[in-house]
Amino acid sequence: MFAMSDGVPAPAHPDAVVAGPTYRFTVLSERLIRMEWDEAGRFVDERTQVVVERDFGLPDFSVERIGDGLEIRTSHLRLRYDGGPFTASGLSVTLTRGAADPHYATWRYGESYPQDLPGRGNLLGTARTLDEADGACELEPGILATYGFAVLDDSTSVLLGSDGWIQARPGRGQDLYLFGHGRDYRAALADFHRLTGPVPLVPRHVLGNWWSRYWPYRADEYVGVMDRFRAERIPLSVAVIDMDWHVVDVDPAIGTGWTGYTWNRDLFPDPPAFLAALHDRGLAVTLNVHPADGIRRHEEAYPEVARAVGIDPESGTAVEFDVTSREFVDAYLRLVHHPLEEQGVDFWWIDWQSGGATAVPGLDPLWMLNHIHYVDSGREGRRPLTFSRYAGPGSHRYPVGFSGDTITTWASLDFQAYFTATAANVGYPWWSHDIGGHMFGSRDVEMAVRWFQLGVFSPINRLHSSSSPFASKEPWGYGPAAERVMAAFLRLRHRLVPYLYTGAWAAHLEQVALVRPMYHDHPDKGDAYQVPGQSMVGDHLLLAPITSPAEPRTHIAAVRAWLPEGAWFDLFTGRRYDGGRRVQLHRDLGRYPVLARAGAVVALQADPMADVTMAPRALELRVFPGTGGSRLIEDDGSAEPGPEERRETRMRQTLHVRDDGAADLELHVTQDRPGPDVRAVAVDVVGVAGVAAVEVVVGERRLVVAEPREVVDELLAPALRVDLGDVDVAAGVSVRLVGAVPRPLDVAGEAFRVLDAAEIEFAVKEAAWRAVTSLEGLALVQELATVDVEPRLRDALIEVAAARRAW
């Protein structure tokens, strides 16, 4: 029989509780208070579908009884309550420290507050689905707000009883959690995850490229597509088979073909051989299921399932979908899904689109499906994984999210960048979108390229499309120029997996989302709220996505961005930008605004076609000159890797600029676990043209290396490579560049590239070219103002001319 997760109650520390006959307040932390009211005094200590832990220890607080009411004080909050049913006049919480808004420092029960983002309001969370969205959709509130307070309402979620199974919540009381963290968003999210559970660690393979298409593939045809991708040197790690894997042509008397569990043998005559062929190509496999219609008489599994739930198979009576029935859930998993998994299915795509009602009041069938599939997927020592839709707060415990079928428009592309980052406000870091858009809309090659580029820097990169024969996402279907860009970016995605997996570990251990809004890292900077589509990706990459078309004659797209303090390097050109300011970034189709923090070391997998499920045998450490630290986290791939199975590599660099303009750069690489860890390592230093000397030490041994050389990547900025060969990283590695010379800026070359692509009059190009090659600074800006060029082209030329060297 399927077992739910541990149903042990989750009461708070008993001394943190302040209660009366109809109310109960629990001081979980000095900035998080639980507030309950029930006229019959029925309070909840069980775990719920949202909350799994309440014992935070005993924070410091005081209580003063005032008549029938009370006042609770912590170092950050003052709660006042009059003793009756919760009302705006009778229940309030004031931020006594950390208040961020001069007009709104007090939360009152039932009151609403101005919602005028980006300036003021709840910073929002996410939504159940983007099905049929053409651009923006309404988002649920999150736990972060510019005011510094927000409430999580857990009044209607179901309970996990002592036996671990779900049960309805007693009564109709109120169960609220007040987050009063001011703008300490990291602390708010830490408390949220302590309350609702940590983000699980996803498997490495989900961070590669996914192929998905709603199309009635034959087995040999699907395998042929996979082989074409490999022949084009475009890596994939997950193969998604949409609903046509199963029989869809069913007797109308029993319903439609959306629900199905029996292979369509016309398309897949030998399912185990088909799945084995995909595994042989290094692909994990997921199948789509729409479970709403239960198990009907045409299914191969029907006789066994019917007998398991007490139905005579001869009757042909459908086994109705009932996720509240233990007998059904057990049969559904054990007799329907497990045999398919034994054939080679790695995880399931749960495509629930059938409402939110069940026989248990308050239980969302989508949440229950996510829960049972995720828990079940972790049996037999496997790392659990499922792929489904968002079902409210707490859904982060069941990655990965499927956002639904968007309309293929620029508006949808634009919203997805914002939507992905904002989901971090409710701790939901693993959204997977239909990259390229799902349905309707129109063919737009530029838009498709920009969507691919966004996908590469999204949590999950899944190419998907509708059943239209014109909507498929193979890069070679967009023409040679677009294909080159798309393929290069898809290769980059696989090279980035070590960096992304480090971000997955950060989400798991530290509850810091891989992709997050700028204000998570800079909560007190007003500019961080003014760039809603911009985000940080991991510790060191800043993404300012292009989500609108290029200017038609110049072929230049632009995006407004905000750069935090410090220096930032363009990942693709190597240009350095000074931070602490707003900028407008201009890019042609082959480039994308992703900037790396000066001082960062980004670990890349050297071979994009190598297996991403394992730590790479060959590493490239891409160094962006500065002073700072980075890390690389890897593990053995086990279900629950702990400290013994986890390896953290620390990379620390320092930059000392000398009076002669040269610099000395030192990189130290250490590990937290004894080795050996022998692998090929190359150190690529961006923005450096040459060095006077290189010193490399591995452990106690000085290493003689080949002369550093320039490497020109198909996509990334040129860099000076120091090839270390095979070294034992666990022994400790030090690389010292003595007398490094910054790479000269090719302003003329870059300006020519921009002007040459523009479809404007030659005389205008020549005038702009003369200005760029003969002037600089304010004089250049003034001269370009007299040239009759499009404003975007003028701004792009100024950006080129204003570029800085590496130091």
Image: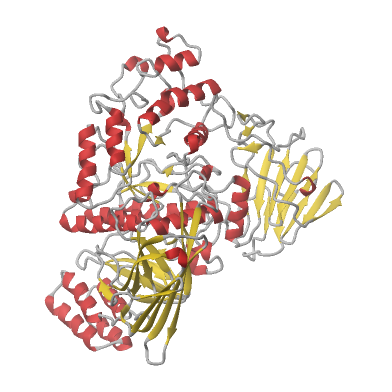
Indicate whether 177 appears above or below 319.
Answer: below
Where residue 393 sits, quadrant-wise, is: top right
- Relative depth, front residue between 732 and 539: 732
The number of numbered discs placed on residues in the rendered structure image is 0
- Where residue 721 sits: x, y (%)? 31, 72
- Where residue 55 sits: x, y (%)? 70, 47
Quick check: 687 left or right of 219?
A: right
Indicate whether 609 appears above or below 785.
Answer: above
| Residue positioned 56% across, 48% down in the render | 198
Quick check: 415 left or right of 477?
A: right
| Residue situated furthest left in the rendering | 762
Quick check: 750 left or right of 125?
A: left
Indicate whether 226 appears above or below 315.
Answer: below
| Residue positioned 29% across, 39% down in the render | 278
| Residue situated furthest front in the rendering | 701
Q: Quadrant of the N terminus?
A: top right
Quick check: 181 left or right of 229?
A: right
- Relative depth, front residue between 801 and 676: 676
- Relative depth, front residue between 705 and 58: 705
Query: Can I make out residue 370 in this image?
Result: no
- Relative depth, front residue between 406 and 386: 386
Q: Quadrant of the C terminus?
A: bottom left
- Where residue 448 sits: x, y (%)? 26, 53
Where residue 184 sits, quadrant-wise, is: bottom right
